[in-house]
Image (tube, rainbow, N blue to C red):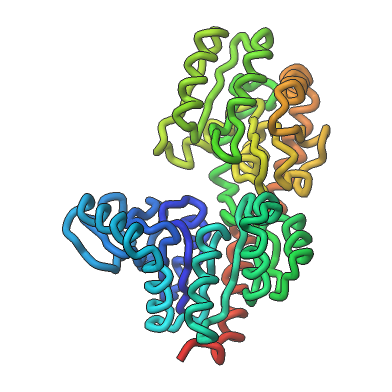
Amino acid sequence: MRILFVAMSDSVHTARWIGQIADRGWDLHLFPSIDTDTAHAELGRVTVHPSFHGDRRGVGPGTRLRGVPLGSWAAAYFARKAFEVFRPEHRVAALSRLLLRLRPHVVHSLEFQRAGYLTLAAKDRLNGKFPTWIATNWGSDIYLFGRVPAHKERIARILAECDYYSCECQRDVDLARQLVLRGEVLPVIPNAGGFDLEQAAALRASGPTSKRRIIMLKGYQNWAGRALVGLRALERCADLLAGYQVVIHSASDDVRLAADLFAANTGVETVVLPPKTSHREVLAHYGKARVSIGLSIGDAISTSFLEALLMGSFPIQSFTSCANEWAEHGRDALLVPPEDPDEVEAALRLALTDDALVDQAAARNWQTATERLDRTHIQPKVVEMYERIAARSRTNRPT
């Protein structure tokens, strides 16, 4: 089977999704939706097709690079930038040519605002000579951008043109249908695939969650992330944080600065994990945390929320995600407005003072994880999904 993914090659979510089928002996290709010759360290057994590539900096040994070799990372970088300026349509043309050359059984776009739009443009360019298309939405692709006039029409076109649609929230299935989805809906599972539950159990601290003295904060502060609201709520709860350590992962520069100020103002030990911290180490921190905070104005099922749920850390999560499809508010997690430090503070105070709440939630959330996050259950479903779609698509490949 030959599959062409259109996705961010440096994304851990891309790497983990493809990793579920990387050992099948299939012919896997990846066309970067953001033109780069960098591939995530976990990505392997796939051929990546940037426009230009250099000296394999940032590319693991299991990844093959195609495109124009320029010998150095710097030369490839400046060539890509020049093409972005002087030939802005070159990636659509390149994807179209690659589709005609590879003739994949399936093209699978991961994410809408880059990969989905790029795939849609290539389909328009090929005028009907197009393989079976799976379109997967990530995060806020429909929930947030579907309400923005500049995006709504293109999102609706993707949903009308794709053959299959996948996402990780029933909420997004309903929204897609409202936008005139025509394709078949695939099983609703996490976009990062499943987790190794044996590894997770080994990384969880022994004893009850109420005895843990770490608070995890997802450090995204951008168009969607609201980590600074979380820091503000933590500062208001400084009277409860004696003996606690605040650990921040995936922090942007402004969050790093705010974390330094938070530590100086409160005296609370604060650790900002380095950008290339391994997933195993991040999970280990979640496994030692009493509470985890993740805030954004739009998301699907946030991976950090699932990591908290898996590792026994009590989740405080913005209600703009679909965490309510996994946890009951006030029982298994606390779902809060992403931009209201008062509400986040109130939730944090409750989670820091109610031992029974966090201990009982940890037990129920582990049961949820065993039922819905075990990769040994999810991976076969993913393999079967591709096999079924490819079998149906053999008569629909471009000629």
Q: Is residue 168 left or right of residue 113?
A: right
Question: Which residue is at a point 63% across and 19% down the rendered structure image?
Answer: 232
In-front residue for pair 228/61: 228
Quadrant of the rendering where the C terminus is positioned? bottom left
Residue 47: x and y in percent read 36, 68
Residue 51: x and y in percent read 31, 65
In-front residue for pair 82/68: 82
Question: Which residue is at a point 25% across and 53% down the rendered structure image?
Answer: 78
Q: Quadrant of residue 68 in the image?
A: bottom left
Residue 266: x and y in percent read 57, 8
Q: In this rendering, is residue 277 above or below 291?
A: below
Question: Which residue is at a point 61% across and 27% down the rendered structure image?
Answer: 289
Q: Quadrant of residue 188 in the image?
A: bottom right
Question: Which residue is at a point 35% across and 58% down the rendered structure image?
Answer: 84
Q: In this rendering, is residue 226 above or below 58?
A: above
Residue 106: x and y in percent read 52, 77
Number of callouts:
0
Q: Is residue 186 left or right of residue 221?
A: right
Extreme front residue here? 86
In-front residue for pair 150/25: 150
